[in-house]
């Protein structure tokens, strides 16, 4: 039997207040925001979407929140920036980093508030403040969904 791969055509809706087109972080003094960009000895395993500090972050489609997700395990002194959410929706499992969640379980409808962008400038002065979007299988590139 012939196998058929269906592209679901899933697209992320607006993630951050003030960035209706999900404009991406390009290049700044700390690096680039695209998937696969160099990060020290490794690579960037997500896609960065611009988001000014303390803005509201919205559900890009209807999602179930599966819990909190910590971006940098075992890195001390990151404080409030080291926060994020694990969720699924539209057949995708993914994480959003640098967000202080409104809640860490349950259902959130598209466009409703998931959380608040952290104060990234305190930790990385001059960076393009951003939400980091990472698939649960982190070798997967989230870019096609934008
Ligand atoms: Zn990132």
Image (cartoon, grey):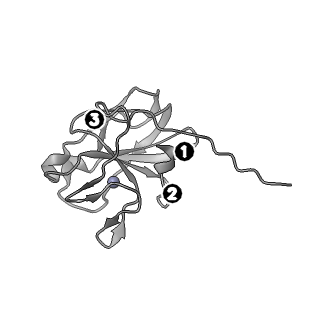
Point 78% across, 54% down: residue: 3
Mark number for residue 140?
2
- Farthest-out residue, right: 1
- Residue 111 horizontal/vertical position (percent): 41, 27
Find the distance from the CA under tag 2 to the CA under tag 3: 25 Å
Point 55% across, 39% down: residue: 10
Q: Which residue is mark 1?
A: 92
Compared across the picture, whether 30 is left or right of 1 comes to: left
Find the distance from the CA under tag 3 to the CA under tag 1: 22 Å
Find the distance from the CA under tag 2 to the CA under tag 1: 11 Å
Mark number for residue 14?
none
Label 2 vs label 1, nearer the camera: 2
Could you tell me which secondary element the residue under label 2 belongs to? loop
**144, 130: nearer the viewer:** 144
Residue 99 falls in image quadrant: top left
Compared across the picture, whether 41 is left or right of 143 comes to: left
Q: Earlier in the sequence, mark 2 or mark 3?
A: 3
Q: Which residue is mark 3?
A: 116
Q: Earlier in the sequence, mark 2 or mark 1?
A: 1
């Amino acid at each position: 039997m012939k196998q058929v791969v269906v592209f679901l055509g899933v697209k992320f809706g607006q993630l951050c207040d003030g960035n209706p087109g999900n404009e991406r972080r390009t290049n700044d003094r700390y690096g680039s925001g695209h998937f696969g960009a160099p990060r020290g000895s490794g690579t960037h395993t997500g896609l960065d979407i611009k988001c000014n500090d303390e803005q509201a972050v919205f559900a890009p489609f209807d999602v179930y929140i599966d819990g909190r997700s910590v971006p940098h395990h075992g890195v001390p002194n990151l404080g409030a920036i080291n926060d994020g959410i694990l969720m699924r929706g539209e057949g995708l499992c993914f994480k959003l980093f640098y967000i202080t969640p409104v809640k860490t379980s349950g259902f959130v409808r598209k466009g409703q508030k998931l959380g608040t962008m952290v104060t990234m400038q305190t930790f990385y002065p001059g960076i393009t403040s951003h939400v980091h979007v990472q698939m649960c299988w982190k070798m997967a590139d989230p870019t096609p969904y934008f």
